[in-house]
Amino acid sequence: MRVVLAEDLFLLRDGLVRLLEAYDFEIAAAVETGPELTRALAELNPDVAVVDVRLPPSHTDEGLQCALAARRARPGLPVLVLSQHVEQLYARELLADGAGGVGYLLKDRVFDAEQFIDAVRRVAAGGTAMDPQVIQQLLTRRQADDRPLGRVTPRELEVLELMAQGRSNAAIAGQLVVTERAIAKHTSNIFAKLGLEVSDDDNRRVLAVLAYLDQDH
């Protein structure tokens, strides 16, 4: 699996390269600036891009903007974003096209290699890997607006948060110590309250929920 990695800090970039290679990923390019990332994504056609939000020369949202432009040119290009902070605008933009293969991890909350590698693989396969804090902020914002999410029960909100992390019904049932049938019922209720079609496609349903929650309407 070929990876384009963008990280401006040398030690972190080098560490990520070594980690990915140890798990049999091929590093197509490891770059440190926005222009380098743009070229690498356009020319190398990677299986997944792992991108820091803030890259030179602007040190603002250079990395994510390059990744978003690449996804517009190649819809569905898997992108896993690494950031120091929860940036709601960035998360919304990343999820807006609903094409799948997206992730948003907070650097200081990646606690072990397996967690990170699992996220890269999940995104590369077209799934989602969202940090719970990112999801919580999106959900909290929606609740504050007194929109349909306000009708979701506390238990359904727990299920929704776990769904948004990319977990299957079976995995959610295991974590909440209930039956998979109960989770399926909660899921149906959530979609009904949010006015969304029920789908057996875990990735599409998560993207639909997240996109809905963060829309400004």
Image (cartoon, rainbow, N blue to C red):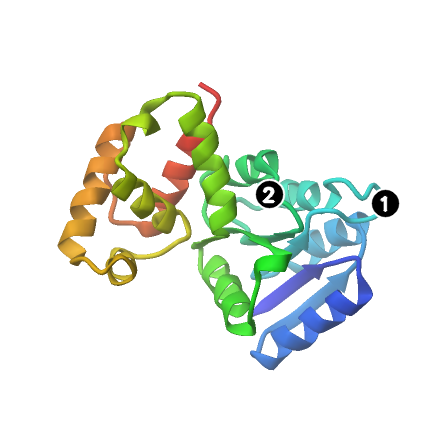
Q: Label 1 to label 2, Cα distance in Å?
A: 21 Å
- Name the side, left or right, on which 97 lies relative to 28: left
Q: Position of residue 100 (x, y in %)?
A: 45, 47
Q: Quadrant of residue 46?
A: bottom right
From the image, tell me which residue sits under label 1.
57
Q: How many marks?
A: 2
Q: On the image, numbered disc 2 is attached to which residue?
A: 86
Give residue 8's quadrant in the image: bottom right
The local secondary structure at tag 2 comes to: loop
Residue shown at 16%/58% (left/top)? 179
Q: Nearer the viewer, mark 1 or mark 2?
A: 2
Closer-to-camera residue (147/101) = 147
On screen, residue 91 versus residue 5, left or right, reads left
Q: Amino acid at mark 2?
A: Val
At a point 81% along the width and 66% down the height, the residue shown is 10
> For the point 75% across and 43% down, which residue is it?
62
Q: Which mark is residue 206?
A: none
- Which residue is at the front of the view, 124 or 107? 107
Q: Quadrant of the C terminus?
A: top left
| Tag 1 and tag 2, C-beta contact below 8 Å | no
Task: Estimate the x, y position of residue 181 in percent, counting from the top left.
Answer: 14, 53
Question: At numbered mark 1, what does the secondary structure look like: helix, strand or loop?
Answer: loop
Residue at figure coordinates x 61%, y 81% from the top left: 22
In the displayed structure, 214 sits above or below 132; it is above
